[in-house]
């Protein structure tokens, strides 16, 4: 008990702080400062004004106040169990310097690694903590010498401000960290906000997993499981090509304006869609299985997709198996066209609105920019067609297709008013290019079950021929 009262004397606490800082400076061979130490009942330690430099004499860590609640220590077993850690007004600056292995705190790991030569392998250090709290912290990660982009999130230069959160059941074992993220929020320097994040989190030198994830950003909500695989943390500097991802999303809402922080060509996009599905691969070549997308009031998509070319939307190629797609003209008219900062939308002919809901089952293979003008075409595109496109957005657009068309009581007269057409029921094979009457060049063969023209109904007609512009030849 006498020792406890002695430790409470300010001069003694100052002496302890100086001795501890001196020991750490010698051990780490760098500058370490500790302004004050407060030991309460031998199970709580409060450190104030902690400062640690890296080997380049830059700030590695500054902590205004650190609370540590100690439950048990077993140095022989390399185990430490803490009841609580609390960091207030902490600044951590992680850096990857050219020509160096690891980050700028690697020397701390090396300093405390066992130097003893023994025939028995050393026991890996294990730290457990019941509760870990962050209050108003700043975290940065920088690959020194990497040129930053003009705008957007830069994985090689991350600065997270106002970082606060609560973690439970923290376990640090070897190079692996596991914890339950109860709450986490921050504002990144790009403007991207992490409003809320909860997850069962695992991190190692080659893998990062967010299980049972619930994430809210500026305007998006992501739920499910997210996993990243990488050779080292430097891979995030080229996240689209160097990091493998697995996304298992459920009941999520994705706003393209948030995606723009990672793919600047989407800047200005106001598109928001509900999304579910399993995605895997690299972001530059992403596979999606059992993907469900909800947009607007009536648009629903279900299918499998392969997306190549991100983050450059003008060179992004899509290969989609469309198991089900439905939409209407009202939803299509709200879709923005690239470049998104010009605030342009799809223009829909007035007669298309009369068609109501249209559906599509089939395939789409082509560049993303070709997809945008397709949605303004007459509803022929919304029938079961396999469509191929060959030209990128900047050049002349040539749309070709091969597949089958099936209609039942299709109201052709609503799409082409004033020409005497009524409803049509048919099954046909098509192979050609072009969709408008001035550019269409298509081979057709099939069977018309019923066709209304000028008040008369024609039935059971087989046909085989070619449609070029407005002229059909064949029989």
Image: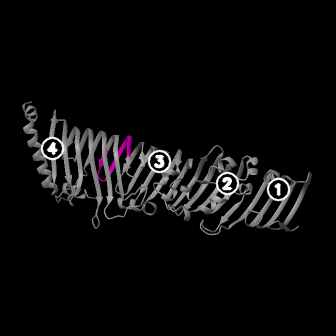
**Residue 95 relative to residue 463: left or right:** left
Which residue is label 4 attached to? 35
Q: Residue at x 38, y 61 (%)?
A: 148
Give the CA distance from mark 2 to mark 1. 28 Å
Please report the bounds of the magenta region as a residue range: 171-186
Res 347 label: 2
Is 118 situated above or below 168?
Answer: below
Q: Nearer the viewer, mark 1 or mark 3?
A: 1
- Would residue 231 be seen by someone viewing this image from the given angle? no
Which residue is label 1 attached to? 426
In magenta segment, residue 189: no
Q: Do the residues labelled 2 and 1 touch (CB within 8 Å)?
A: no
Give the CA distance from mark 4 to mark 2. 66 Å
Q: Which of marks 4 and 2 is nearer the N terminus?
A: 4
Q: Quadrant of residue 54?
A: bottom left
Q: Which of marks 1 and 4 is nearer the N terminus?
A: 4
Give the CA distance from mark 1 to mark 4. 84 Å
Measuring from the top left, give residue 25's x and y in whole percent: 14, 53
Res 225 label: 3
Measuring from the top left, give residue 315's x and y in whole percent: 55, 65
């Amino acid at each position: 008990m006498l020792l406890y009262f002695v430790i409470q004397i300010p001069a003694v606490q100052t002496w302890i702080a100086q001795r501890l800082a001196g020991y750490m400076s010698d051990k780490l061979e760098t500058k370490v400062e500790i302004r004050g130490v407060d030991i309460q009942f031998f199970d709580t330690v409060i450190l104030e004004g902690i400062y640690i430099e890296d080997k380049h004499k830059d700030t590695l860590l500054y902590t205004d106040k650190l609370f540590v609640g100690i439950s048990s220590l077993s140095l022989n077993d390399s185990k430490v169990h803490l009841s609580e850690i609390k960091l207030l007004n902490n600044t951590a600056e992680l850096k990857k310097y050219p020509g160096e292995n690891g980050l700028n705190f690697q020397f701390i790991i090396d300093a405390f690694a066992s130097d003893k030569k023994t025939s028995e392998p050393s026991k890996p250090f294990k730290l457990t903590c019941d509760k870990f709290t962050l209050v108003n912290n700043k975290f940065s990660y920088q690959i020194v010498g990497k040129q930053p982009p003009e705008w957007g999130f830069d994985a090689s230069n991350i600065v997270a401000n106002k970082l606060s959160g609560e973690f439970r059941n923290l376990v640090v074992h070897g190079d692996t960290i596991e914890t339950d993220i109860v709450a986490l929020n921050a504002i990144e320097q790009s403007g991207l906000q992490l409003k809320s994040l909860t997850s069962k989190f695992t991190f190692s030198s080659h893998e990062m997993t967010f299980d049972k994830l619930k994430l809210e950003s500026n305007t998006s909500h992501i739920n499910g499981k997210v996993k990243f695989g990488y050779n080292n943390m430097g891979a995030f500097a080229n996240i689209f090509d160097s990091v493998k991802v697995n996304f298992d999303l459920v009941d999520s809402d994705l706003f393209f304006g948030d995606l723009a922080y990672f793919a600047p060509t989407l800047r200005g996009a106001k598109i928001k869609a509900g999304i579910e599905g399993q995605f895997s691969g690299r972001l530059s070549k992403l596979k999606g299985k059992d993907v469900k997308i909800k947009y607007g009031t009536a648009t629903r998509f279900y299918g499998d997709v392969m997306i190549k070319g991100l983050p450059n939307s003008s060179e992004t190629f899509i290969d989609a198996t469309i198991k089900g797609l439905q939409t209407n003209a009202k939803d299509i008219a709200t879709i923005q066209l690239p470049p998104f900062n010009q605030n342009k939308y799809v223009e829909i002919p007035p007669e298309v609105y009369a068609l109501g809901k249209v559906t599509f089952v089939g395939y789409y293979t082509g560049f993303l920019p070709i997809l945008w003008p397709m949605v303004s075409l007459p509803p022929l595109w919304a029938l079961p067609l396999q469509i191929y496109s060959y030209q990128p957005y900047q050049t002349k657009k040539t749309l070709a297709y091969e597949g089958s068309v099936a209609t039942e009581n299709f109201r052709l007269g609503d799409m082409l008013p004033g020409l005497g057409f009524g409803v049509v029921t048919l099954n046909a094979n098509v192979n050609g290019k072009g969709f408008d009457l001035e550019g269409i060049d298509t081979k057709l063969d099939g069977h018309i079950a019923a066709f209304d023209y000028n008040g008369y109904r024609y039935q059971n007609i087989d046909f085989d021929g070619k449609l070029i512009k407005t002229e059909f030849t064949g029989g």
